[in-house]
Image (tube, rainbow, N blue to C red):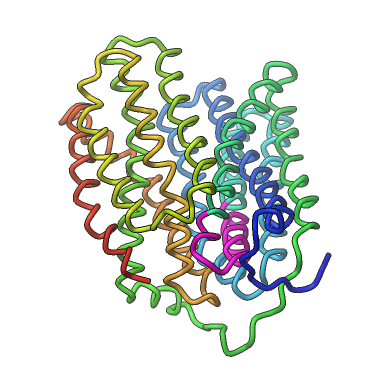
Amino acid sequence: MGGAEPPAAGGSRSLAPRLLPLIGGQLCLHAAMTGLRMAAPLLALHEGHSAVAVGALLALFAAAPFVLALPAGRMADRHGYHRPVGWAVAMAFGGAALAALATLLPPAWHYALLCVAAVLCGGGANFGLIAIQRTAGRLVSDPTGLKRVFSWLGLAPAVSNMVGPVIAGVVIDAAGFGAAFAALALLPLAGLVWARRVAHEAPPPAATTVPGRRASWDLLTAPPMRRLLLVNWLLSSSWDVHSFIVPVLGHERGLNASSIGLILGAFALSVAGVRLAIPLLAHRLREGAVLAGAMLLTATVFAVYPLAHSALPMGACAVVLGLALGAVQPMIMSTLHQITPQARHGEAIALRSMAINLSSALMPLGFGVAGASLGATGVFWLMGAMVGAGAWPARRLATAH
């Protein structure tokens, strides 16, 4: 491993050897979590647990990151990449290994141990993500480079959302749940191989460290940070509402499971496509303008979506929505790195992570309540109105830095 590596702009050729290990490490951690998030509920259902119990199990994957985000951000700011990623690997490996161990014990132990595994694996994946995103933002020093870096980095969760569940599903069918959990436990260990290719960072000067629990919340006193978190919450909720409501709307329209799956798959492919395109266009894009445009486009799609009555127009809506929401993360992360002090990037990323995970844990309940009273159409239109109104604070981010 090399010495400290300062932020540098540089072209894509010089950036690739430093960015690839971060993408690989995130893919390994996130794939372990997504695989466990699919397999653990399947085992719980297989053993006769209720839908409520399965929902509680899934909520733990988001609850742990919410609790651990700030410690992860502070550790990353103090110690750089390797220590928090080491903790992340240990937690993710421990979670998957504990789930594998649970299958060797009497069934009465399974659910409780799966809950602990969800806490460990969900927390570990997010612990590593914060350190990885912070390190990626330090590879470059200009806004165009930041947009490119976070576009490439955004491909890791898109790929891992496929890799983890596919590995889990194939191994479950071939050798059972225990073998699947054991296979998933190997993925975080592969992340350690990638970590060896990440340069160590020089410790920050003592004057740049901000002691005390209050310090992280002080970041919220800056209006640009508050606007950014509001915009991020609205767009993250739009992602969640699409995943939640499309199966409901598809069922109302009489679509089969394959058609609904293809609609969601078209959305995922569109997200990946726009993240591949952003590095080519980064020098032409302004963060505030892209975010405002994404919010207006999302609001328009949500207004039209309920009017689609068959798979083809719903799939077209999903593709357009994927283009809008897929462009969001690189712009959010680029803006966040520009409006916060470099010595506190880890804390700022942690605050964003807390907002996303709290939303992911609570919003499905809100969607369910709203859906029961308003129907799927009403939820789409309500969310569209909220996102459309958020375009103004998003536009103001263009002049915030």
Name the residue located 62 percent from the left edge and 58 percent from the top edge.
Answer: 132
Who is closer to the viewer here, 271 or 244? Answer: 271
Residue at x 61%, y 66% (from the top left corner): 9
Indicate whether 373 appears above or below 221: above
Q: Tell me which segment is drawn in magenta.
A: 126-147
Q: Residue 204 magenta-drawn?
A: no
209 horizontally vs 91: left or right: left
Quarter of the rendering occupied by the C terminus: bottom left
Residue 179 x/y as whole percent: 75, 27
Quadrant hosting residue 108: top right
Residue ranking furthest to the right: 1
Please state the horizontal and vertical placement of residue 331, each as a whole percent of the image: 43, 55
Give coordinates of residue 67: x percent, y percent. 49, 59
Query: Which of these two is toward me, 9 or 116?
Result: 9
The residue shown at (32%, 55%) is 289
Query: Would residue 146 be counted in the magenta stretch?
Result: yes
